[in-house]
Image: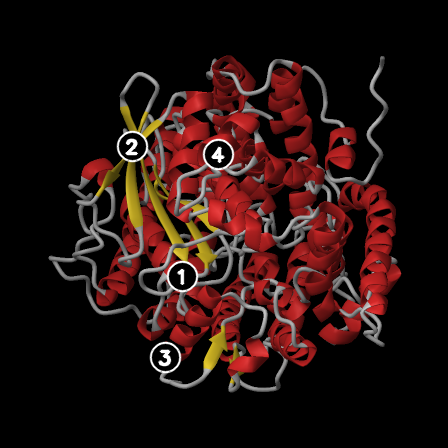
Amino acid sequence: MLRLRTLVIATSIALAACSQQSNEQAAPPAPAAAGTTPAKASTAAPAAEVSAVNPFLSPSTLPFEAPPFDKIKDGDYQPALEEGMKQHLEEINKIADNPDAPTFENTFIPMEKSGQLLSRVRRAFFAVTGANTNDVLQKVQQDEAPRFAEHQDAIVLNDKLFKRIETIYSHRDSLKLDPESKRLVEVTYKNFVRGGAKLSDADKTKLKDLNKEESGLRAQFTKKLLAGTKAGALVVDEKATLDGLSDGDIAAASQAAASRKMDGKWVIPLQNTTQQPALQNLNDRATREQLFKASWNRAEKGDDNDTRELISRIAQIRAEQAKLLGFSSYAAWKLEDQMAKTPETALTFMDKLAPPATARAGREAQDIQDVIDQQKGDFKVEAWDWNHYAEQVRKAKFDLDESQIKPYFELDNVLQNGVFYAANQLYGLTFKERKDIPVWQPDVRVFEVFDKDGTSMALFYADYFKRDNKNGGAWMSNLVAQSKLMGTKPVVFNVANFTKPAPGQPALLSFDDVITMFHEFGHGLHGMFANSEYPSLSGSATARDFVEFPSQFNEHWATDPKIFANFAKNYKTGEPMPQELVEKIKKAKTFNKGYDMTELLSAALLDMSWHSLSADAPKQDPNRFEMDALTKAKINLSYVPPRYRSSYFSHIWGGGYAAGYYAYLWTEMLADDAFQGFVDKGGLTRENGDRFRAMILSQGNTQDLATMYRNWRGKDPSIEPMLLNRGLKETPPQKQ
């Protein structure tokens, strides 16, 4: 998921892009996008005065200005955040109070340069709170969330600043601006208007209160969900009930129990999605049901970690925000500046997918039921049965077993000889591991990235293993963003939640995990190739329904024959995967796609339903609302639960995907159509890669995104490649 949030100021943080694979996760909380107060310091009680030795006070002296995590202490973040907001508002007020007539040079350039301290600390803070948090940092996160909202409000609702922006916007066509500068003016102006800059003072005050409340509730949601996910892990007393899991998985479960001081037991931690990886192999049906329900009910236990009251209120607040801003719903407000433009467009698009997806899921369910009946199961397939029996169907139909595949997907080999190799073949990149760059946790690895001419161009951090103090899923973000104006090069990181092996054991991945690595690195390439003048338009700072396009496009190279052959090698022998097994994987390409598409559609439709509520709608009961929404959409299949239930849907309540989860589907369309464009021109070639880099990956948000795509592809995107690639439409017969 890219957890990305494009704000209207230079310190905006493109928060990580999340994967839509099984390890997907939304962003750590980002500040609200709208604001309401005049430009003044936060009225909240400030943290302790920042120390002169605080490592954030000056730019890092490390390569690429990478954060000095070896010197940063938990106590450094809050005072640096407070000082950063203070300095930023002083800089903004200086721009707003400038007595000279507004020009691009005296308004937009200093705005882009403002808030550098705040940007440094926030990027590091969100990286650590997402991937390696603790009680101290969670407290800071909760304290600062409403202050971030107030800070954003103080900028967006600064009347004098907006008048300068509006004046330049009104005369933009006569100012002889270069295309990127003109784009900056247009994007910034629209973001200010969308944030409430034209509201009356009374409505600004109302919006400010709503923004502050929402920001605090989002931080609470993230904290509750992290705790609920940890507490919801399945604790197993009898090893026999884990029958079907590999020795490595059982050892990892034992280690997870030991880390919680539960010696003699086994613990299966929860992933962020509804379905859990272990459900595929667990033979004991009662244990499968327990694990599924532990996931399903993690945030609905009526305890301190129950999120239902929070999400009901957040939905209300967002509807009220939208009404103040002149929109019928939050979804209508949110999609106005997206590629889809309106909720109706997004829903029409999803309506085209739902019938073939559910029909295929129904056929898949019958295949599973046939296996159950053949085995005298005497039960109807339920959600906790699906993955277990689907694997058996796959074995029967394609003679393909996940356990056969994993030995060929050792993590480091996939990274070095798959992910990095593809980037080399397409774009000429090379990578060198750096042991001298400090990290936030010992599992994190750092690589220096070199361009095709040997020039050092970026740093890439990889944090792949699951921890209890890490948000679930997978994502990308920047620690330093590229900007010619600022003279900065990108520092990018990927985070995932792959099971950490027991000591001495290899980290073997599922094929879905492999796809996740390619996906997140696609986001990484979007950040690394950024070539913009202005930080606000750089890299992945694009519309939500475009930002997942580079990542989903990059997934395709995982199965390219040349790339696949380079990394799919047995971790013990180094022997390549037998061609027979490769062919089985190819034949099984569209296996279970009805299920996959239906669970994704269910989540996207849930999101759109929550955010289509009007401000007049009563407060909703999440369970009833969820059932009614899925039933109305004719996608309420008992055996295909939504990828995320409302109560743990962190993309939309804690991250930046509110009314935007459809973007994963929309960008699948872009990605599949784009890959077809590569196929039409010879596939995996440097010429194709360099052109895609130049016209798409390096452009950030410097152009209208639909126009950018059309200029590269030569036409608008088609849904046909997506339907074919996902097995939702029969492949047309080849001409003889």
Report which residue position mark 1 lands on.
Answer: 500
Label 2 or label 4, whichever lies nearer to me, is 2
Of 100 and 543, nearer the camera is 543
Q: Is residue 611 visible?
A: no
Q: Secondary structure at mark 4?
A: helix
Where is residue 704? Give x, y as percent: 60, 26
Tag of residue 275: none
Q: Residues within 10 Å of mark 1 (few under 14, many from 20)?
A: many
Report which residue position mark 4 lands on.
Answer: 165
Report which residue position mark 3 lands on.
Answer: 258
Residue type indicated by callout 3: Ala
Query: Picture quarter containing residue 538?
Result: top left
- Disc 1 + disc 3, Cβ < 8 Å: no
- Image position of 499 (left or right of 366): left
Mark 1 or mark 3, earlier in chain? 3
- Disc 4 + disc 1, Cβ < 8 Å: no
- Disc 2 + disc 4, Cβ < 8 Å: no
Cα separation between marks 2 and 4: 25 Å
Of 56 and 212, nearer the camera is 56
Report which residue position mark 2 lands on.
Answer: 488
Residue type indicated by callout 2: Thr
